[in-house]
Image (spheres, rainbow, N blue to C red):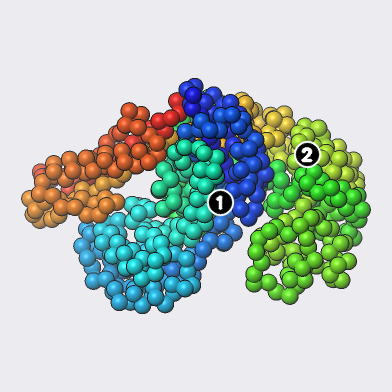
Amino acid sequence: MQFSLGIDAGGTYTDAILVRNSDSSIVSSSKALTTYPDLINGIKNAIDGLKQEHIGKVSLVSVSTTLATNTVLEGTGSPVALILVGEHPIKGEFPAKHTVLVDGGHSFNGEEVLPLDVERIRNFALKVKNEVAAFAVSAFFSIRNPEHEIVIRTLVHELTGMPVVCGHELSQELGAYERAVTAALNAQLLPISNHFIQSVMDEIKRRNINAKLLMLKCDGTVVGLKEALEKPVESIFSGPAASLVGASYLSGCDTCAVIDVGGTSTDVSAVYDGVPELTDAGAMVGGWRTRVRATRMETSAMGGDSHVWTRSKTIFIGPRRVIPLCIAAARYPSFMEKLQKSVTPPRHMLDWNVQPTKFFMRSGFKASDLNESETAVLDVLGDEPMSLDEIISLSKKYPSSIVLDSLIQKRLIQPVGFTPTDALHVLGDYVHWDAEASALGAEKLGRMNKMDKSEFSSMVKNMVAKNMAFNLMSFLLPDVERSGIKRIVDGKFPARFKVDVPVVLLGGPVRALTQELASVIDADIIVPDYAEVGNAAGALFGKGIKRIEFIIRMISVAEPDAGFYTFSPLGRGEFRTYSEAVNSSKELGKKMVTEYMGDCGVSKENLEVEVTHMSYSPEGWKYDPLETKLIVVGVGYPRDLRVR
């Protein structure tokens, strides 16, 4: 009997599930805290929490992670150099440390516009090679003819030994600027993603697991290890994609809306007839518009571990994530005493960093580029939480909130504070850690708002539920004014929303929020079994899907018998007749799809390939089509897993 292992490395928790291949039943699940700066320790802990007698029989491992997303959002990717070729439109900046524009490129028909300026490329590569970790190349109309990108890739790799990413390998969509951005982001992620995937491989090998390794992409499909290493940018938003696939599988609903309450954020998305809803435009991440296809979603920075703080008798949640008080007390024996002694700051000084329940500690990330004030604070912090009073006592100086913010953004210090998770511990709805610490924190913050601990915690719980409802309705009603949606959700009118599709909830504490959510919206709310590890299920049950697009175009309108060009991810081809061009494209597309699916663990028996094409010709045209778009799509599940 064989099993499959699904792993999701999220911002707060790393989840794992073990599934029996014969009937796709879940036999074991586990949650562990995500570990920073190295995620692999969290993955080890999650696997350790599964039934160990089955681990040696695992034949398939599939992973999803927020690593790529967080890296781009936090601006912590590796430095890269970007080479732009030809008449490149410069709409704005690029995510690259060095950029150069050189002569070359092709026309819409794949004809060379100018010879490639090889000498300038050579000089640029040698000049910047010691300042970057990878190169990206984007040539004008490389989707019609990638010759120049391929020449540059070979040359730069020979000169520097570094990885080189080509724009045509990542997208066949028009949009030169966005394709260049996508190539640069992919180059940024190569070293980081390689380390993560290699760490997972090493851990699987250490456990003597002989399994195929897959990774979930941001469109809800799985990708083989080889392509995951080459195109890490496609794992951006794989976490939300995993929640969609997992929610649909666990609930048995092919069509549903999904609310995933994680530690860091709440994500809302939808699946229709088993297919995740995708954005029409490419994924937007960290302010960069890419050519990466991703699930459409509504996200807010309010999760189970979002910081709850107060000022002027007003309660705020987020947007920053902190370690909950209940977890800090369970981890550090001295923390409870520090929380008891923590004093309430003067009201005029209160902000998100100055709270009676706020503590700080080192994160474990390596420090660099610090100013004097930042160094002074970091020098007194240790590996256990410290209050502001302790920091002041040791540094002889009151640290400004700006300095603390800067250190948090640089991921050098980890804050601790009261969270919605603590509120649920106080109310007894979700008790997994030290509820006494949560209760003490609720007392301190409640007193500042003239509430007892239960009233304060109930208010926080209600705010989270209303935020879930607001995100859901904003997602389902994208053309409706958000302020109007918020007023209805907040109960300003004697009416509430009715949702006509099932609403599936994922996340550890979501069962405790169903009643509050049901009071705000009228919907069939489902909390499936194993909802707390839904993303790990999604990582495992994503389909293998590969889409190859070909353009077949007549060489000359004036001479219809001159032949046809074909444009594909492999470059430009030339054929004497239209039928030869079509048949060759079909066969090549099927071959590419089959090879890709083999890397994804999909056998030919489990693979469905469909070919569609659309032709365009002027009215009254009497010859073969002027242009044809031919699309080859393969769909299948990994061969080891029988999907119910």
How many numbered discs?
2
Horizontal and vertical percent position of residue 462: 75, 38
Question: Does residue 191 lie above or below 267 as drawn?
Answer: below
Secondary structure of residue under mark 1: helix
Residue at 44% over, 64% down: 134
Left or right of 425 on screen, residue 241:
left
- For marks 1 and 2, the one nearer the N-term is 1
Left or right of 9 on screen, residue 413:
right
In 3D space, how far apart are the residues under numbered discs 1 and 2 (Cα atoms)? 26 Å
Horizontal and vertical percent position of residue 159: 36, 71
Judge by depth and name the residue closer to the eye, 170 or 107. 170
Residue 433, which numbered label? 2
Q: Are marks 1 and 2 in contact (CB under 8 Å)?
A: no
Left or right of 458 on screen, residue 609:
left
Residue 502, which numbered label? none
Is residue 237 something that shows in the picture? no
Left or right of 633 on screen, residue 354:
right
Residue at 40% over, 48% down: 227
Residue at 71% over, 48% down: 306
Judge by depth and name the residue closer to the eye, 475 or 19. 19
Which residue bears the numbered disc 1?
67
Horizontal and vertical percent position of residue 597: 36, 38
